[in-house]
Image (cartoon, rainbow, N blue to C red):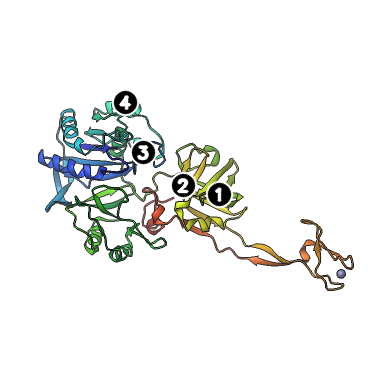
């Protein structure tokens, strides 16, 4: 059986993963076992109505069998899951009502943009639903149809958009995956020793803990939530080791989630003419308009392929990444990875592969007259030079040039401080299966 919960948090409070922790406790109280790691599934980061991270929580449960799996701790009690599930029939309709009733105290229902949904299904939904949820826009009605066809049960609150994420999360097949260990506190006193964060960030399988360029601690949330910290990495054992290396203020519980964070699952390779609003894309093109800095500190340029032209942006929050983008020139060949903003239609760059950035010539000075030794003057762009004293003329090539080496080819990414949940950091790219 699969339980999916989504859209319970708000911009300034709570966190769906904490609701997930309480869902696990409730399920165990009812005599169910958790099967496998709980899952935190991020969906289309470009949807206009998302709450915070647009992530749903999925818990597989039932009668456990197979190996025991350590998944975390709740106020001193160790939490386990099983690796496999014995088949058993459960009345999902009754259970979804019961769980929703018991968890709704954690839902931020007063918040306008919070529209929770709880789904219980005996089987995974078709995988296609996940890919649509992470890459496109879905409606509540569409998803309700799919739930009904599968014989699953659900409970909606307000607009009930949460059933979209909950169902798409149930449909996830974890072809690429990472893990996040989240620690929870009740206290308002929160601290993490930066030196220990820098230390765990050096572990090769751990990513996005610390941003050296901006001296930013990325494991602590900015908003008020029960989360004290979240460490992201490629395997659960290394996360537990990293947790033990951290020095922090006290926390009462922690839980390891399997997630699609850092997988680039949202990205689709497209030609420019195929791009639609709210897509996330990989587009190869040639720089057709030089980068320029606009108000607010954003850097914008244009790329073209044989099907069209589109603007690309490194926004102010991407900090030093903008300096790399500003070095691009018309004629460079690049592959841009990012989300599509609607108005004006622009790719918000998450990372870029600069395929070719050839050296170029830059004029240092006008030629000297071979007749009388004076500096010559330009007769206009591309028209050559003339000596004002003796009238002697030479071509453009006579000027003095230097070759500017670019040394720009390769992958570049936004710094950790600006990373989106789904974006795959370069640090773990080589570890990921079937990446592009
Ligand atoms: Zn001359």
Which secondary structure lies at badge 4?
Answer: helix
- What percent of the width, then of the height, locates residue 386? 84, 63
Disc 4 within 8 angstroms of ligand 1 (CB): no
Which secondary structure lies at badge 2?
Answer: strand
The answer to whether the residues at label 3 and label 2 have Cβ atoms under 8 Å apart is: no
In the displayed orientation, state which residue is furthest to the bottom: 373
Q: CA distance from mark 3 to mark 2?
A: 17 Å
The answer to whether the residues at label 4 and label 3 have Cβ atoms under 8 Å apart is: no
Tell which circle, 4 or 1, labels the residue nearer the N-terminal end: 4
Q: Is residue 373 above or below residue 129?
A: below
The residue labelled by disc 3 is 50
The residue labelled by disc 2 is 338
Please rate how many residues cluster around mark 1, counting C-alpha atoms within 10 Å: few if below 14, some from 14 to 19, many from 20: few
Which secondary structure lies at badge 3?
Answer: loop
Please rate how many residues cluster around mark 3, counting C-alpha atoms within 10 Å: few if below 14, some from 14 to 19, many from 20: many
The answer to whether the residues at label 2 and label 1 have Cβ atoms under 8 Å apart is: no
Instruction: Please state if 158 lies on the left or on the right of 92 as rendered.
Output: right
Tell which circle, 4 or 3, labels the residue nearer the N-terminal end: 3
Which secondary structure lies at badge 1?
Answer: loop
Q: Please identify, in this view, whether the residue under mark 4 or under mark 1 is nearer the observer.
A: 1
Return the residue nearer the eye: 393 or 226.
226
Quarter of the figure that contains the N terminus? top left
The answer to whether the residues at label 4 and label 1 have Cβ atoms under 8 Å apart is: no
Q: CA distance from mark 4 to mark 1?
A: 45 Å
Q: Please identify, in this view, whether the residue under mark 4 or under mark 3 is nearer the observer.
A: 3
- What percent of the width, then of the height, locates residue 219? 30, 55
């Amino acid at each position: 059986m699969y339980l999916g919960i989504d859209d319970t948090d708000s911009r300034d409070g709570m966190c769906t993963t904490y609701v997930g922790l309480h869902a696990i406790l409730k399920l165990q109280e009812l005599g169910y076992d958790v099967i496998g790691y709980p899952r935190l599934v991020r969906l289309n980061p470009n949807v206009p109505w998302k709450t915070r991270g647009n992530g749903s929580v999925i818990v597989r449960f039932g009668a456990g069998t197979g190996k025991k799996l350590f998944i975390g701790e709740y106020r001193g009690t160790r939490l386990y899951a099983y690796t496999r599930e014995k088949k058993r029939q459960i009345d999902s309709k009754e259970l979804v009502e019961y769980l929703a009733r018991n968890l709704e105290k954690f839902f931020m229902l007063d918040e306008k943009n919070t529209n929770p949904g709880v789904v219980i299904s005996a089987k995974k939904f078709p995988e296609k639903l996940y890919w649509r949820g992470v890459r496109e826009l879905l409606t509540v009605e569409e998803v309700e149809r799919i739930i009904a066809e599968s014989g699953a049960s659900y409970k909606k609150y307000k607009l009930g958009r949460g059933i979209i994420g909950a169902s798409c999360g149930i449909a996830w097949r974890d072809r690429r995956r990472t893990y996040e260990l989240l620690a929870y506190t009740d206290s308002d006193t929160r601290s993490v020793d930066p030196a220990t964060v820098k230390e765990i960030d050096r572990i090769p399988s751990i990513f996005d803990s610390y941003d050296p360029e901006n001296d930013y601690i990325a494991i602590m949330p900015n908003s008020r939530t029960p989360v004290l910290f979240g460490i992201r990495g490629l395997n659960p054992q290394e996360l537990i080791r990293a947790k033990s290396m951290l020095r922090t203020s006290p926390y009462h519980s922690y839980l390891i989630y399997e997630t699609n964070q850092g997988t680039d699952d949202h990205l689709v390779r497209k030609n420019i003419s195929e791009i639609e609003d709210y897509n996330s894309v990989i587009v190869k093109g040639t720089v057709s308009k030089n980068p320029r800095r606009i108000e607010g500190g954003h850097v914008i340029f244009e790329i073209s392929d044989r099907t069209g032209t589109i603007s690309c942006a490194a926004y102010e929050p991407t900090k030093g990444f903008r300096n790399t983008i500003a070095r691009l020139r018309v004629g460079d060949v690049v592959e841009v990875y990012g989300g599509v903003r609607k108005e004006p239609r622009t790719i918000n760059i998450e990372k870029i592969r600069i395929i070719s950035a050839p050296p170029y010539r830059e004029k240092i000075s006008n030629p000297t007259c071979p007749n009388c030794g004076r500096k010559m003057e330009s007769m206009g762009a591309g028209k050559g030079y003339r000596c004002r004293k003796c009238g002697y003329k030479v071509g453009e090539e006579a000027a003095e040039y230097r070759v500017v080496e670019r040394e720009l080819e390769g992958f570049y990414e936004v710094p950790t401080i600006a990373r989106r949940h789904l974006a795959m950091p370069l640090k773990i790219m080589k570890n990921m299966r079937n990446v592009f």
